[in-house]
Image (cartoon, grey):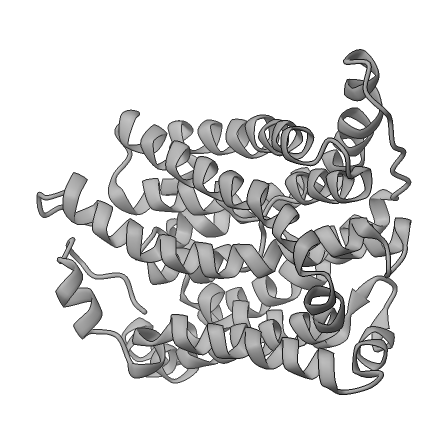
Amino acid sequence: MASPTVLADDTEVMRGLSRLDRFLPVWIGLAMALGLLLGRTVPGLDDALDTVKIGQVSLPIALGLLLMMYPVLAKVRYDRLDTVTDDRRLLVSSLVINWVVGPAVMFALAWTFLPDLPEYRTGLIIVGLARCIAMVLIWNDLACGDREAAAVLVAINSVFQVIAFAALGWFYLEILPGWLGLPETSLDISMWDIAESVLVFLGIPLLLGYLSRRLGERGKGRDWYESRFLPRIGPIALYGLLFTIVILFALQGDTITSQPGDVARIALPLLVYFALMWAGSFALGKGIGLPYDRTTTLAFTAAGNNFELAIAVAIGVFGVTSGQALAGVVGPLIEVPVLVALVYVSLWARRRFYPAKETV
């Protein structure tokens, strides 16, 4: 999954992928189906998986995310991060899209599509507030985005998430609805609960990835690290992704399959949200002159959401059987296949809008 030195066409990219990478949509579809089947047919499996946690953090999901994120973060060249932090167009655009535009778009869509379903509406608004800090690294890597930029933007999102999540929840669930004459909802979530989620889902794999590169390059050199070590650990990321998907859908398999009508109602605004956020961000990146790799990173970090945090908050505040929790669970049910599809759209857009060879 290494980014090429120059922009190649889609055929070259696909030829360079392993069988695991090339048929990723198939494996993801099978993982989702397996998780739903297990959750539906194995009595008490969801309760058993949900009890294995510390605080609100599910240990099986945490394990899957650790396996998924560590290889990607081990690929990051941390000595090049200054080239990202100096790119104000990218940083400012990402902050505005993630923390101003994204929550506002989800708020508008939730009220437009679910005006008569307050629990699902609240759940969607919570999903919109939880900016992505995990799976986006996988989608960005598959689409040949900028790994260093993704690491920086994810780190920034994690900091803002700790600081701003509760305040934005208060604004979008209590203050703004009051101004508009709409029903209000309260959200009682502590900063520490959010920090705990960020620490587990991002902090641990980020530290391991940084130490791997530092110690590996110091002991064996960069050539050995990138040509020998990284190819060996690379497939672990996709195995971790598939494991996470199975566990996630096993946790709520019975709920999802027993309420197909409600799932469809929740899915529609999510589909619109992911399409708007990705396409709008990609167009913005192209418009302000970002190269393909950073435009792609901007688009995926804007479109993805931190479903782990959204589900944990919904369950912690409203209960595991609540409509808010169901809306949180439907999030990845829609997000995973949509963002996989957008990986291929991104590669097509690279050929269509970035035809010239340019250094990545």
User: Where is residue 70 shown, x and y percent of the image?
Assistant: 53, 70
- Of residues 184 and 224, the one nearer the viewer is 184
**Which residue shows up at 13% across the image and 46% down it?**
358
Picture quadrant of residue 88: top left
- Residue furthest left in the image: 356
Residue 195 lies, with reference to residue 273, above or below; the image says below
**Left or right of residue 336, residue 323 in this image:** right
User: Where is residue 146 shown, x and y percent of the image?
Assistant: 35, 51
- Of residues 297 and 352, the one nearer the viewer is 352
**Which residue shows up at 38% across the image and 37% down it?**
279
**Left or right of residue 343, residue 252 in this image:** right
**Which residue shows up at 48% across the image and 64% down it?**
73
Residue 68 lies, with reference to residue 201, above or below; the image says below
- Of residues 241 and 256, the one nearer the viewer is 256
Can residue 198 be seen in the rendering of this structure?
Answer: no
- Of residues 14 and 182, the one nearer the viewer is 182
